[in-house]
C-alpha cells in the first residue's frame, strides 16, 4: 500500500513539471504602431518580417489603431518591411528577436510612392529635423512631429536677455572661411548690443577627438542595418557610401560598445559644461553651401550635437560674397528644445535679416545685406 502511494505522488510530481514546461514559451514577437507624420494611426498596412537565416516570412495587417503584433517568432535576426499605398515602404534590417521578449518598433510612415523606401541607417544618432521660414514655424512643425507634448508652441518671450557661450569652431573641422567668421562675429556683437552676455569659450581639450566616437557609432550602425542592402545593391550605391559601409562592417561590437560608453560620458560632460549658459553659439558649417548638387556641404559643425542628442537650430544671419546665406547655430543640452526655441526667437527678432524669398520670388541680396549691423 505504501508503495502505491509513493507511485501516485511521483506521477503527480511529474505531471506538475510537465505542465510547467508546456507553459513556457521559446518564441519572441515584434510589435508596434504604424502612424503618419501627424501621429494618426495608419490602418490596413502590411507588416512583414523575414528571418534572415531561414528566409521564413510572416506577416499581418495593422488594425484600426495602427497596431500590429507578429508572435511566435523563432529567436533570430529578422528584416522588417512595412508598406501601404500612398506611403514610402519602410525597411529595417537586423531586428533581433529573443526568447520570451517582444521587440517594439513604432514607425512613422512618409508620404510617397510605395516603390520608394525608407531604409533605417541607425538609431542612436537619428534625430528629428525641420526646415522652416521662421522659429515659430519650426516650433509648430517640430511639435507636430515629435512625441506628444515634448515640443510646444512658442509662448511667453524670455524674461531677460540670454547668456551665451560662443565657440568659433570645432577641432575636427576645416577653418571657417572669412565671410562666415566675420558674419558670426557681427551677429555676436548685435546680440551684445541688445543686452545678451556672450562669453567666448575654447573647446575642452579632453574631447577634441570626440568626432571619432560619432564616426564609430554612425558607421557601425549603418553597416549593421544596411549590410543586406549593400550586398544586393552594391553596384548602384556611390563609391563613398560603399566605402563607409565597408568600414562600418569591419568594426567590432567591442568598438561599438566602447563608443557608446564614451557617448554617455560626453553627454554628461557637455551638459555640465553648458550649465552656466542658456545656449551656445557656434558656426553651423565652415562656409556657405557649395555650388551644384554633388554634395550637401560639410556637416562637421553638427557632429557634437548629433552625438550627444542636444537640440540645435540654425538662424540665417547674412550673406556670403557668392550671395548664399550664412548662419548662426544655437545648441542647448538634451531635453531643452522649448528653451532653445524661445532663445532662437529672441535672437531672430534682433537680426536684420530679411530672407531670400519675398512675395514668393527668389530675391538677390544687396551687398549691404551681407552682414548684420
Image (spheres, rainbow, N blue to C red):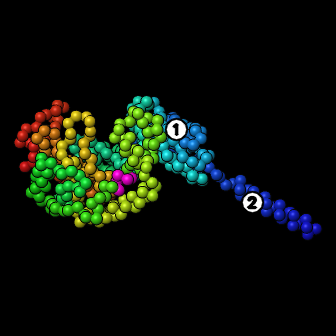
Q: In this orientation, which residue lies closer to the viewer: 158 or 330?
A: 330
**Circles 2 and 1: CB atoms closer than 8 Å:** no
Q: Position of residue 264 (x, y in %)?
A: 37, 61
Q: Position of residue 160 (x, y in %)?
A: 17, 60
Q: Position of residue 142 (x, y in %)?
A: 32, 46
Magenta segment main secondary structure: helix
Q: In this orientation, which residue lies closer to the viewer: 127 or 339?
A: 127
Residue 304 visible, this angle: yes
Q: In this orientation, which residue lies closer to the viewer: 292 or 123?
A: 292
Label of residue 348 in the image? none
Left or right for 200, reference 44: left
**Dot 2: element:** helix
**Dot 1: element:** strand
Left or right for 38, reference 22: left
Label of residue 47 in the image? 1
Query: Does the segment drawn in magenta span residue 179?
Result: no
In primary-sequence order, the first of circles 2 and 1 is 2
Q: Which range of residues does the magenta coloring cover?
A: 213-217
Which residue extends farthest bottom?
A: 2
Q: Please identify the quadrant where the N terminus is shown.
A: bottom right
Neighbour tally class for label 2: few under 14, some 14-19, many 20 plus, Cα within 10 Å: few
Neighbour tally class for label 1: few under 14, some 14-19, many 20 plus, Cα within 10 Å: many
Could you tell me which residue is drawn at 23 percent across and 52 percent down?
Answer: 173
Residue 156 visible, this angle: no
Could you tell me which residue is drawn at 83 percent across and 64 percent down?
Answer: 10
CA–CA distance in space, label 2 to label 1: 38 Å
Label of residue 17 in the image? 2
Q: Position of residue 148 (x, y in %)?
A: 39, 49
Please, is residue 183 above or below residue 260 in the view?
Answer: above
Residue 140 position by quadrant: top left
Amino acid at each position: 500500500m505504501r508503495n502505491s502511494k509513493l507511485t501516485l505522488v511521483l506521477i503527480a510530481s511529474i505531471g506538475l513539471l510537465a505542465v510547467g514546461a508546456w507553459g513556457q514559451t521559446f518564441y519572441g514577437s515584434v510589435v508596434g504602431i504604424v502612424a503618419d507624420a501627424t501621429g494618426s494611426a495608419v490602418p490596413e498596412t502590411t507588416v512583414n518580417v523575414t528571418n534572415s537565416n531561414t528566409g521564413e516570412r510572416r506577416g499581418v495587417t495593422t488594425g484600426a489603431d495602427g497596431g500590429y503584433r507578429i508572435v511566435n517568432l523563432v529567436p533570430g535576426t529578422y528584416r522588417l518591411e512595412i508598406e501601404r499605398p500612398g506611403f514610402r515602404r519602410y525597411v529595417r534590417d537586423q531586428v533581433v528577436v529573443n526568447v520570451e521578449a517582444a521587440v517594439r518598433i513604432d514607425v512613422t510612415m512618409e508620404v510617397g510612392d510605395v516603390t520608394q523606401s525608407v531604409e533605417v541607417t541607425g538609431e542612436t544618432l537619428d534625430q528629428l529635423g525641420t526646415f522652416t521660414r521662421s522659429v515659430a514655424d519650426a516650433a509648430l512643425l517640430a511639435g507636430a512631429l515629435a512625441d506628444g507634448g515634448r515640443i510646444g508652441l512658442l509662448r511667453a518671450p524670455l524674461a531677460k536677455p540670454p547668456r551665451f557661450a560662443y565657440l568659433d569652431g570645432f577641432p575636427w573641422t576645416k577653418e571657417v572661411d572669412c565671410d562666415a567668421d566675420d558674419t558670426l562675429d557681427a551677429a555676436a556683437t548685435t546680440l551684445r548690443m541688445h543686452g545678451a552676455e556672450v562669453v567666448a569659450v575654447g573647446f575642452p581639450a579632453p574631447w577634441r577627438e570626440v568626432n571619432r566616437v560619432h564616426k564609430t557609432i554612425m558607421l557601425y550602425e549603418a553597416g549593421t542595418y544596411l549590410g543586406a542592402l549593400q550586398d544586393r545593391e552594391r553596384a548602384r550605391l556611390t563609391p563613398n557610401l560603399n566605402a563607409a559601409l565597408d568600414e562600418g562592417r569591419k568594426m567590432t561590437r567591442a568598438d561599438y560598445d566602447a563608443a557608446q560608453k564614451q557617448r554617455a560620458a560626453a553627454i554628461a560632460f557637455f551638459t555640465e559644461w553648458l550649465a552656466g549658459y542658456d545656449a551656445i553659439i557656434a558656426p553651423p558649417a565652415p562656409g556657405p553651401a557649395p555650388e551644384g548638387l554633388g554634395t550637401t556641404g560639410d556637416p562637421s559643425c553638427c557632429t557634437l550635437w548629433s552625438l550627444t542628442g542636444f537640440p540645435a537650430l540654425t538662424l540665417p544671419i547674412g550673406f556670403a560674397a557668392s550671395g548664399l546665406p550664412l548662419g548662426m547655430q544655437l545648441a542647448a543640452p538634451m531635453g531643452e528644445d522649448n528653451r532653445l526655441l524661445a532663445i532662437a526667437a529672441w535672437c531672430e527678432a534682433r537680426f536684420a535679416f530679411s530672407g531670400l524669398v519675398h512675395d514668393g520670388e527668389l530675391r538677390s541680396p544687396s551687398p549691404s545685406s551681407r552682414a548684420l549691423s
